[in-house]
Each structure stands twice: as C-alpha cells, then as structure tokens.
C-alpha cells in the first residue's frame, strides 16, 4: 500500500465526460477508481451507514430512502350558487406513496468493530467509502456530481490512501 491522494473538480461537463476524465487522471497516477457508472447513477441500495468507535462504544448512524404507502381521505368539491368552489374531504380513502429519507442513530457497547471508523454512502450521484483502521491506515474515496441543467453539471472526486502511522 502506498500513500497518495488525488482531488479533481470539473465544471460544465456531462456525467460521462466527468467520469472519463477522473478515470484517466487516476490511471495516470496508477490509482484504481472504484466507482461504477451504473451503480453511481442508480444505486442498488441507496443508503448511508457509518460508525465510529469512541471509548469502546460503537456510535452508529444510518440513512435510507423508504417509500411507504399511506391512506388519506379523498378530496371532493362543489360549486356554490354564487360560483365559488368549496372543497371537502369525503369518507372514502385513497392510497398514495411517499418517499422519505429515514435516519437512525444507535450505540453498541463493547463491540469488536473491524475498524476504528467507517462510512459507506451510496446515493444517486453521491458516493463515499471511508475506512480508518486501528493501526492508523486510511482509505477514502468520494465522488459527487450535480446537474446544472438537463445534460451538464459539476463534479468532485477525491481519493486518498495512507499507510499506518508509525
């Protein structure tokens, strides 16, 4: 393992141009880029999970999108004699879907965590993998892309790898 880092920002580019440029720059430095375009655009499991071990306790955080089906009363309307429209709720129910980002935090006592700290985030156009080992070695990869219009946008890529501290 070697010590290295690369940081790239690109503006006014398509997603394909951004990822191609990042891959080329990583190859020039002999670095492997872990990001797969299909998974970057449509993650199979859009979620985030992280933990940090502090004083023997594992502090955990997670976030994921959940789509739930809910019920609500149907909305109806009628016109008054003066031509106004009045709205009211009927006794009938209808289903609707709602997608929310759900966050959770918890603590695990006396854990045997494999790392001192870890982050795994995979949302559409926003991914990160961070691992801080007990010996001080570290790996971090971040890739984000934001669309400014239908086709182009701006992106950020960062990757660092550090050997154990002596």
Image (spheres, rainbow, N blue to C red):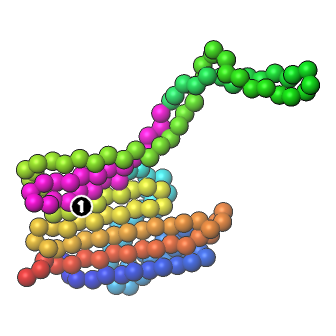
Residue at horizontal 28 percent and vertical 48 percent from the top:
105
x, y (%) of residue 120? Answer: 31, 58
Bounds of the magenta segment? 48-68
Residue reaching furthest top? 91
Considering depth in this image, is 131 or 53 the residue closer to the camera? 53
Q: Is residue 31 above or below residue 84?
A: below
Residue reaching furthest front? 82
**Residue for badge 1:** 118
Please tell me whether mark 1 sits on a helix, a strand or a loop. strand
Count of marks overlaid on the render? 1
Q: Residues within 10 Å of mark 1 (few under 14, many from 20)?
A: many
x, y (%) of residue 103? Answer: 36, 47
Magenta stretch, main secondary structure, is strand
Q: Is residue 120 above or below residue 158?
A: above
Q: Is residue 30 visible?
A: no
Residue at horizontal 47 percent and vertical 43 percent from the top:
100
Point out the image quarter for the N terminus: bottom left
x, y (%) of residue 68? Answer: 47, 33
């Amino acid at each position: 393992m070697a010590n290295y880092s690369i940081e790239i920002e690109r503006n006014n580019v398509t997603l394909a141009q951004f990822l191609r440029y990042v891959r080329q720059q990583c190859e020039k430095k002999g670095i492997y880029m872990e990001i797969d375009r299909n998974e970057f655009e449509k993650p199979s499991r859009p979620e985030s999970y992280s933990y940090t071990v502090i004083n023997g306790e594992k502090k955990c955080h997670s976030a994921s999108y959940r789509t739930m089906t809910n019920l609500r009363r149907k909305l109806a309307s009628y016109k008054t004699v003066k031509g106004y429209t009045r709205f009211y709720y009927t006794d009938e129910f209808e289903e609707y879907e709602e997608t929310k980002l759900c966050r959770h935090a918890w603590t695990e006592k006396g854990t045997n965590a494999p790392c001192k700290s870890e982050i795994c985030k995979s949302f559409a156009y926003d991914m990160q993998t961070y691992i801080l080992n007990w010996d001080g070695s570290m790996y971090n990869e971040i890739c984000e892309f934001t669309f400014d219009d239908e086709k182009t946008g701006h992106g950020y890529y960062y990757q660092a790898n550090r050997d154990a501290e002596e």
